[in-house]
Image (tube, rainbow, N blue to C red):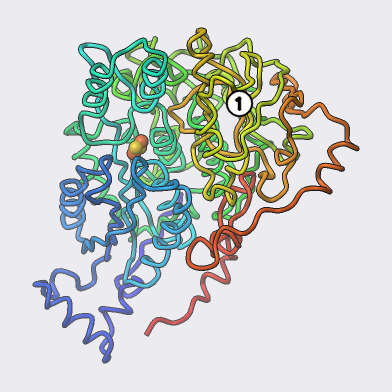
Amino acid sequence: MSVRRKTAEQLRSHRWYGVNDLRSFGHRSRTAQMGYTAEDYRGKPVIAIVNTWSDINPCHSHFKQRVEEVKRGIWQAGGFPVEIPAMTLSEPFQKPTTMLYRNLLAMETEEILRSYPADGCVLMGGCDKTVPALLMGAISMDLPTIFVPAGPMLRGDWNGVVLGSGSDTWKYWAELRCGNITQEEWTEIENGIARSPGHCMTMGTASTMTSAAEVLGFILPGFSSTPAPDSRHAQMAALSGRRIVEMVWEDLKPSDLLTDASFDNAVTTVLALSGSSNAVVHLIAMARRAGLTLDLARFDAIARRVPVLANVRPTGQYLMEDFFYAGGLRALLAELGDLIDGSTHNANGKTLAENVAGAKVFNEDVIRSRASPLVQRDGLVVLTGNLAPRGAVMKPPAADPALLSHTGRAVVFSSYDDMAARIDDPALDVEPSSVLVLRNTGPIGAPGMPEWGQLPIPKKLLEQGVRDMVRVSDARMSGTSYGACVLHVTPESYVGGPLAFVRDGDLVRLDVAARRLDLLVSDEELAARRAAWVPPAPKFERGFGLLYSQHVQQADLGCDFDFLETVTREHRDAEPEIH
Ligand code: FES
């Protein structure tokens, strides 16, 4: 990769600090107001630290300390750090779903970088949607960018039983509902499942997307796996601060890192990790921001050749702390060998091949070899059929294998509230072979495509020992969830996708091997139901909800706003002069 050294006069911040006019007087005098002298910033790269810390985000609770370590690195390397807070997107707290606000944080990130004197940026996130959101904004702005991931929290503990975020919540909630554990035990689990700073330590969306971000080149090699409380995590923060200053001088930007090959590597990595199905939506959105074409068909094609090597919950047995001790992402990438294109680049300026050279697996049960994978292939599949003309996704390794070829009677819920009201009703006409259908849970319908796709098993079936059923929805599913859940059905039912026309008792056929999802009713009958369908009223009349509803795209296009996709390089270079 060629290195083009910038001069101080070529820094973007020179327009704020380096010239001698009325405006720059204001910039300098107001910087002095904060206690800095010209020696602190003159001729130095200004590094915006976009920090998603907040009191309501437990996954980022250590970011107050980490940001000081990032700043230390920036000062050491001769940069000028400027911390700028951004919307936090706290997965456990934000309603109806953080996904509703992913694009808003992406917009905020892009506009922060555009409107302030940033020469480069350090993005601080980790909790699920913060990773794609921050990166989408930074990709669009295309300034030198490095990502400091929150890192996974430590293993959960319940009287010696290892607990995993999300996965064990769903598991023990089912056991509580059918009387297998007590309320006291449930409270003990509540107090032990999240016991340190950091993001979810299962292979949820956070671990999946930070791993993908590392493979795309935004995170220094190996550090997406480092647990949040580990001292090496703090070291990573300082290293990232030092490195971003050099990246500015080298003018190493996202557009230098992102290629079709780097996205193929990210998809391959997600599949080898048996990562969150949410990665499909996020990676497509990120690629489209970069002006690249990544689509559902590419995911399915890559899945056919990539084995699952990470034995991490919910597909596997272990947690991210174990994955780190077993060698972490570098070891997994080394094991993937020729399935990865080693010529792509990382923020550290080296190729992926150089960065994984010498990486070793220290526990072959946690990181499997290609000769002994957890799952041979198809860690994620893309289904199409008359029920999902533009596609749906499913994670077969997280499902009961007996359900991968299945035909059952539909039990239809028209909304989440309808499902919540009736799922445990003893009178619900449902049997183990039924297919639970949930509609109006897509990007526009819910809104924000919440993680409702793992519909709970009806209580009366739980009590019979049923633990998995085929479930179909236009929702997403938490990466920590599991089950035979068909997700992201596109187009969504709220805008007239075929899911809107399913009725109780219709036969739904799932055939994973054939990549099919079909409603077994005639074309004529489907057409008649479509003709009789009355579109629901718009959900919003004002505000962000209206903007969102008018511009969000469907899941197969990544749910980005149509007006935020990539503009040409010429357009970006012609941005208005800043005065
Ligand atoms: Fe933040 Fe899971 S709640 S990553």
Amino acid type at mark 1: Arg
Q: At 30% from the left edge and 76% from the top edge, which residue is drawn?
A: 14
Q: Looking at the picture, does residue 560 appear above or below residue 476? A: below
Q: Looking at the picture, does residue 416 appear above or below residue 7? A: above
Residue nearest the viewer, comparing 188 with 33: 188
Q: Looking at the picture, does residue 29 appear above or below residue 143? A: below
Task: Please provide percent x and percent y for residue 244.
Answer: 30, 54
Among the 4 quarters of the image, the one containing residue 301 = top right
User: What quarter of the picture does the C terminus occupy?
Assistant: bottom left
Answer left or right for 72 relative to 335: left
Task: Please provide percent x and percent y for residue 176.
Answer: 36, 17
Q: At 42% from the left edge and 18% from the top edge, which residue is drawn?
A: 174
For mark 1, give the secondary structure: strand
Task: Please provide percent x and percent y for residue 155.
Answer: 26, 22
Q: Judge whether residue 327 can be spotted in this image.
A: no
Q: At 39% from the left edge and 38% from the top edge, which residue is drawn?
A: 210
**Residue hosting label 1:** 471
Residue nearest the viewer, comparing 137 with 290: 137
Q: Looking at the picture, does residue 195 appear above or below residue 491? A: above
